[in-house]
Structure formats: C-alpha cells, structure tokens
Image (cartoon, rainbow, N blue to C red):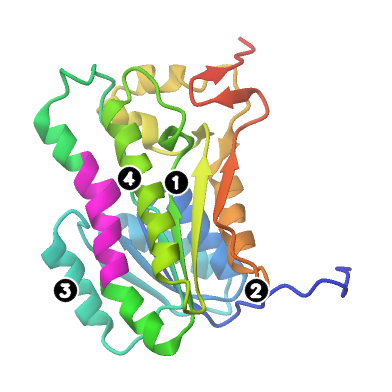
Amino acid sequence: MRSSLYQTQDIKGKRVLITGASAGIGKACALLFAEQGCNLVLISRRLEKLGEVKAEIRELFPECYDVRIESCDITDPSEVTKVIDRLGKTDIDILVNNAGLALGVEAGDRIPINDVFTMFNTNVTGLIALVNGLAPRMRLRNTGDIVNISSVAAFDHYAGGAIYCATKAAVDAFSNCLRMDMVDTNIRVIGINPGLVCGTEFSLVRFKGDSARAKTVYDGVECLTAIDIADQVVYSVTRPRNVQIAQMRSYCTQQAHAKYVLSRK
C-alpha cells in the first residue's frame, strides 16, 4: 500500500495527446496512460498501426476509455492544423511530443540534405507546431503538461550524429525557453532524455530498413525499454502540481554516454 505522506496527482480522466503513438515509446506511453484511466488522442502517420494499438488497449482495459486515433504527418504544418481543427473544443490536458527519428550516420559534411530536412521537420518543427496549436488552450485554462521527448544525444554529441544531436539540442533549448515563457502559468514543461532504448523502430529507421545492422546496436546490452521511458513520462505528470520535472536523463546501467556502452557479447 502506498504511503499517504506524499500525495501524487490522480490523472484519471485526463486527456492525453501522444505523437508517434503507433510503436515504441509512443505506444508504451499510450498503454501506461490507459492503465491510469486517461482518455487518449493517438497520432501517427500509420493509421492501421494506430488501430492495432487501440485494439490492444481495448483488450487490456475493457472498461474502454475514450481512444481516438488520428493520421498525421507532423512534418507538414497544414496536417497538424487539420488535426487540431478536428479536435474542436476537445481540451488536451497532457501533450506528449514523442515523434522523432534519426536517419543515417554520415559525417556532418556528407548528410543528404533531404535527411536533414526530415530530421529537423520531424524532431523540431513538428514538435513546435503541436505546442503552438495546443498550448494556447492550456493557457486559457491555466493548466496542462507539455512533455517533450528528447535524447541524451542533446548533450552527448558523437561522430555520425551531427544532425540528430543538433535536433535534440534544439528540443532541449526550446523546452527550456518555453518553461521560462510559461513561468507565469500553471503549465509544466517537462523534458525526457533517454539513453539507449531497445525494442523500438529507432535503429531500423536510422539504418533505413537494414535490420541486421540495426540489431548490432543492441547486441549484448541490457538496454532501457520503451516501457521504462513511458514510466518516466507518467511519473513526471503525476507529481504534485508544485513539482515540475524540468529534465529527466536516463541511461541503461551499462551506459555512461550515448556512445559509451558496455557490451557483454
């Protein structure tokens, strides 16, 4: 039985919007928030995958919370606007900006420019578009949580990660400035910075479908999992309202830097 000395926040009935919710950390967040009794708005480019996530939630939690799925490419501001318009007067209590990706490991002077645009538009511009679209309503209600999923790559810079590291550094900078911009409100801006996470599509996307190469990233390492990071997200938003988790950095136990990982192969 939990101690009554420290009262956490009950988020049952809160409405949570999660981007990149069709797999990985986004899907794990959807499951844990559903377990907390939240209503969900799940966003991804892959509507069919979102349908599978919704079905899994219904099976695990037959009390059947409100689960809404929306297809949206967040790199296109017009699509973000359309989704927000479709939400109408539906208030979002918790925004989880999870969608993000890395493409390739080329040197900074050799990265295909289209990959540069895709990474910035997904990791940075799309995130900002969601905040700009939803935070004004939070301001009107003077309440809400904005959770931005970044990475230890925001400060653990490494060769082959020039653009990905730059995008995550931008996410952290945006979060820090937004927190200052929101300081006269009851809105919390939360940053989550995971280290090596397995069981997601991150490396498969980074290596453009090369599953054998993607597998080598995690060989012999007891990594963090998507559910570990989702747990951190839920932990952050269930703190009492006087507590704002500005940044939560986590590594797996055999990791000390984005690229300093002990393999036990």
Q: Amino acid at mark 3?
A: Lys
The mark found on residue 82 in the picture is 3
Name the secondary structure under disc 1.
Answer: helix
Q: Amino acid at mark 2?
A: Asn
Q: Amino acid at mark 4?
A: Ala
Q: Residue at x 89, y 68 (%)?
A: 1
Report how far apart the C-alphas of labels 4 and 1 lie in the structure: 22 Å
Report how far apart the C-alphas of labels 2 and 1 lie in the structure: 30 Å
The mark found on residue 24 in the picture is 1
From this view, report whether residue 138 is shown above or below residue 262.
Answer: below
Residue designated by label 4: 170
Residue 111 or residue 198, whichever sits in front: 111
Name the secondary structure under disc 3.
Answer: helix
Nearer to us of marks 3 and 1 is: 3
Tell me which numbered mark, 4 or 2, is placed earlier along the sequence.
Answer: 4
Nearer to us of marks 4 and 1 is: 4
Q: Residue at x 24, y 63 (%)?
A: 129
Residue designated by label 2: 242
Name the secondary structure under disc 4.
Answer: helix
Residue 79 or residue 149, whichever sits in front: 149
Q: Residue at x 54, y 18 (%)?
A: 260
